[in-house]
Amino acid sequence: MLVNLLLLLVVTHALSNDLWDSWYTIKTSNGKELIRYGKYHETVQESEGRIIGQISAWKKERGFVKNEQIGAAIDKKSNEPIFFNYLSTLAEQNIKIDGTFKKSENTRTLTTIVKLGKTKHPTKEHNAPQSLVLSTLFSYWLSNQYLKLTPKNIISFKVLYEDDFQSNFSPKKGTAEQVKDDAFSTLSKTMKVRITIGRNKTFWYLDKKGHALRIQSDQFQWVSDRVNEKTAEKFLPTK
């Protein structure tokens, strides 16, 4: 399935409409100050009736640089998920996950294949609720809610994390709401939005296109800023 996504990206690249191509840096707290932790590259394309998202992330963990590659596709008209892929590499430890969605008359199912190192787990089927948001394309979904976000309009959603095999790919309920401006949103002329998923809260600073300029968690003390590719590479060299 990962091969299918790569082929899809290559074959349709010339026919695709690039919605955005962004780099982000990630800083986290060591208890005293914010330090460099990681970076990620996020692309979203429209191609042949599909929205295709891909995230490549690099994070410092246990003295190594962990690499994650996540891809997902949804139907442009219905926003319903079609499939996703997840590949994680840390030292010699690999995790590979493929997920495909199938819709019948009254139900929708998610079929997953999980491989941890050399161990391939049995194929599983899960019930998939309607209006499900894949985390890879959460920023795309949020940008489409931009004009609906007001202090009085709280938008509910269900999000699925593509690597969440330990929770059996159980979707998480969440809300999005515009909140009062702070110094950063005023200076950057962005909309400050609070995203709540379970007990976790993050703040997203959206530009006028609904695209995140900054994402931060006061709760877990990390901040992610949108930068250019050159800045991201200097922040955490991987080449």
Image: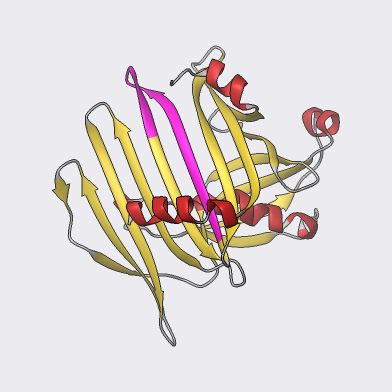
- Applied colour scheme: secondary structure
Above or below residue 196? Residue 100 is: below
Using residue 132 as the reference point, say whether residue 225 is left or right of it: right
The x and y percentages for residue 116 are 21, 44
Q: Main secondary structure of the magenta part?
A: strand
The x and y percentages for residue 201 are 59, 42
Which of 58 and 174 lies nearest the eye of the viewer? 58
Q: Is residue 228 magenta?
A: no
The x and y percentages for residue 173 are 52, 59
Work out whether residue 190 can be spotted. Answer: yes
Q: Residue at x 18, y 55 (%)?
A: 121
Q: Which residues are magenta?
A: 51-67
Above or below residue 177? Residue 21 is: above
The quarter of the image holding the N terminus is: bottom left
Residue 228, by quadrant, is top right
Work out whether residue 160 can be spotted. Answer: no
Using residue 22 as the reference point, say whether residue 173 is left or right of it: left
Q: Is residue 57 magenta?
A: yes
Q: Residue at x 16, y 52 (%)?
A: 120
Q: Residue at x 63, y 56 (%)?
A: 141
Above or below residue 80? Residue 56 is: above
Q: Residue at x 65, y 27 (%)?
A: 227
Residue 103, by quadrant, is bottom left
Farthest residue to the top: give it.
32
Above or below residue 145? Residue 182 is: above
The quarter of the image holding the C terminus is: top left
The x and y percentages for residue 164 are 36, 50
Using residue 100 as the reference point, say whether residue 144 is left or right of it: right
Which of 188 and 91 lies nearest the eye of the viewer? 91
